[in-house]
């Protein structure tokens, strides 16, 4: 009954607005079955697998995939919830919140069809475009399900890794030889202020993340090539994923150079910058002072994939980890897109208002994504990046937590319209991908917010309005420039928003914010 649904206190996700149903499969592959692009890389020898969740357009006309979604808190749920509690510091406010929330969190489901058959591509190429999406601190393969699921509903296969670098509250490694044995990778508490020790610790985390991304790229090539891979994910003990992955063969647009897009949030955004730069600018003997975190061989497939045309999507970039002295040479290099005349046309940066008001990080972000100038510019007339922020948005607004807990984000952080904020993000991402040549579905007419008198009932195959720099082109969607002039808005916040905001991908921001509000 509808009235019973309205009384259900369990947080839930809005429906995806793209034309395709969304399937999802949990994947964990032994490292022994994969080939790293960097033959010398083995930064995490005791982690024997790489794990990721795949979101993809799926069929729902058969028996498979008609389940009730995927649990947002994965198994073992009790251990995950306990890890979140430890991550939050177990203060009085945290304890009170966790006396109620776990009972609800256990039942939160991602509205996808588990292990459904992938849909036959409707694109001219007969292949689906592919995106790799890296999570931030406190995140996981499930923590951005709404934004990546929304992209999948528009015809994109999105790969969401579960990084085992100590950035998640907890992660589990399933030992292939011992099915019941789990290895726990706990969260590593690292300061958010620059120091030699912090740089070294963040370098090590990035080294693991880049190694994982290289292995996942090799896994995608093998999956698309029909190579059987062992999947040891907990949810696949009944071999539900074996046929699912087999169905992906020849379905992925991952062989054409520049076809894969690279996206991430916060620490995940800086991970993708480091990844594409590490691949594109491979070290040579003339840069002996440079200490690369990832050195793919010239013959590796990933080297052919990353080009100036590769779309790069950066959500609330957290700039500190890329400032390490060990990688200063790489930092000095422009993003690969600026080595071609099209420049920043395939580069999108979306900030939250919280990060827009964090002056030092904002200026670092602008420096990282700006096109070269003066004598360093090969193409002076090339366009710069697309850079925006939605008004009244928090750092967690681009993750699932804004739409699951809108009552907290509104009260504590003044973050408004969480569902709309995510739709604006998705609109901008889709349009950048269209402009890069990716075949994605039309944007839903309801998402376009057209005037009621427009008479339009169809979506748009081109949504240039979302990328317009004109003032008030889209309500509360602010276009920024990359110059470092500080106006009255950014000068109001000269210090960083602190650990709680950087770690706001999880309930830590919600809880710590609630505690501050009650002080």
Image: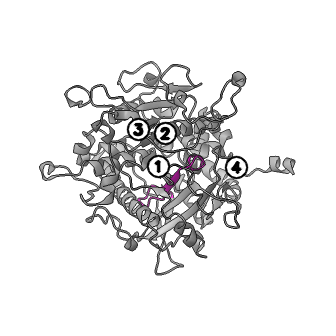
- Please tell me whether residue 249 is drawn above or below residue 447 in the rendered image: below
Residue at the image position 41 percent from the left and 28 percent from the top: 494
Which mark, residue 136? 1
Q: How many marks?
A: 4
Question: What is the CA distance from the residue labelled 4 to the residue labelled 3?
Answer: 33 Å
Residue at the image position 34 percent from the left and 48 percent from the top: 276
Residue at the image position 28 percent from the left and 46 percent from the top: 324
At mark 4, the secondary structure is loop
At mark 3, the secondary structure is helix
Question: What is the CA distance from the residue labelled 2 to the residue labelled 4?
Answer: 30 Å
| Residue 517 appears left or right of 68 | left
| Mark 4 / mark 3, whichever is N-terminal | 4
| Mark 3 / mark 2, whichever is N-terminal | 3
Give the residue furthest to the bottom. Answer: 177
Which mark, residue 434? 2
Q: Measured from the top left, where is residue 19 in percent x and y?
A: 64, 46
Asked if the stretch drawn in magenta spans residue 168, the answer is: yes
Question: What is the CA distance from the residue labelled 2 to the residue labelled 1?
Answer: 26 Å
At mark 1, the secondary structure is loop
Q: Which residues are magenta?
A: 149-169
259 or 212, which lies in front?
A: 259
Q: Which residue is mark 4?
A: 12
Which mark, residue 346? 3
Q: Measured from the top left, where is residue 153 in percent x and y?
A: 60, 48
| Residue 469 appears left or right of 397 | left
- Please tell me whether residue 494 is drawn above or below residue 255 in the rendered image: above
Number of residues whose C-alpha sits closer than 10 Å to that of mark 2, classed few (under 14), some (14–19) or many (20 or more): some
């Amino acid at each position: 009954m509808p009235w019973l649904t309205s009384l259900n206190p369990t947080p839930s996700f809005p429906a995806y607005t793209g034309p395709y149903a969304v399937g999802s499969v949990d994947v964990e592959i032994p490292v022994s079955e994969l080939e790293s692009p960097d033959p010398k890389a083995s930064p995490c020898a005791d982690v024997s697998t790489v794990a990721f969740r795949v979101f993809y357009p799926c069929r729902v006309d058969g028996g498979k995939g008609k389940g009730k979604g995927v649990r947002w808190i994965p198994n073992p749920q009790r251990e995950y919830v306990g890890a979140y509690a430890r991550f939050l510091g177990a203060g009085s406010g945290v304890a009170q919140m966790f006396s109620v929330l776990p009972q609800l969190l256990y039942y939160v489901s991602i509205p996808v069809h588990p292990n459904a058959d992938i849909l036959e591509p409707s694109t001219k190429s007969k292949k689906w475009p592919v995106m790799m999406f890296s999570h931030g601190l406190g995140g996981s393969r499930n923590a951005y399900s709404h934004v990546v699921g929304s992209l999948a509903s528009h015809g994109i296969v999105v790969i969401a890794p579960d990084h085992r670098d100590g950035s998640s509250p907890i992660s589990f490694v399933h030992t292939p030889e011992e099915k019941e044995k789990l290895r726990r990778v706990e969260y590593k508490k690292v300061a958010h202020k620059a120091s030699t020790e912090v740089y070294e610790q963040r370098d090590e985390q990035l080294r693991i993340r880049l190694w994982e991304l290289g292995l996942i790229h090799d896994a995608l090539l093998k999956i698309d090539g029909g190579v059987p891979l062992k999947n040891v994910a907990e949810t696949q003990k009944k071999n539900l994923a074996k046929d699912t992955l087999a169905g992906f063969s020849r379905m992925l647009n991952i062989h054409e150079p520049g076809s894969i897009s690279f996206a991430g949030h916060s620490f995940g955004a800086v991970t993708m910058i480091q990844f594409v730069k590490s691949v594109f600018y491979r070290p040579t003997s003339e840069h002996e002072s440079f200490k690369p975190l990832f050195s793919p061989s010239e013959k590796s497939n990933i080297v052919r994939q990353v080009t100036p045309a590769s779309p790069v999507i950066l959500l609330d970039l957290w700039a500190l980890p890329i400032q390490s002295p060990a990688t200063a040479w790489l930092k000095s290099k422009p993003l690969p897109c600026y080595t071609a005349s099209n420049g920043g046309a395939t580069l999108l940066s979306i900030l939250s208002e919280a990060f827009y008001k964090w002056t030092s990080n904002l200026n670092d972000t602008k420096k990282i994504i700006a096109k070269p100038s003066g004598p360093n510019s090969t193409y002076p007339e090339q366009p710069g990046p697309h850079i925006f922020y939605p008004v009244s948005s928090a750092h967690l607004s681009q993750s699932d937590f804004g739409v699951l807990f809108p009552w907290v984000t509104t009260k504590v952080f003044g973050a408004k319209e969480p569902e709309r904020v995510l739709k604006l993000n998705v609109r901008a991402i889709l349009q950048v991908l269209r402009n890069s040549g990716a075949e994605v579905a039309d944007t839903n007419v309801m998402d376009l917010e057209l005037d009621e008198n427009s008479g339009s009932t169809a979506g748009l195959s081109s949504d240039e309005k979302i990328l317009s720099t004109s003032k008030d082109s889209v309500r509360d969607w602010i276009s920024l420039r990359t110059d470092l002039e500080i106006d009255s808005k950014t000068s109001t916040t000269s210090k960083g928003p602190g650990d709680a905001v950087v770690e706001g991908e999880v309930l830590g921001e919600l809880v710590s914010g609630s505690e501050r509000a009650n002080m």
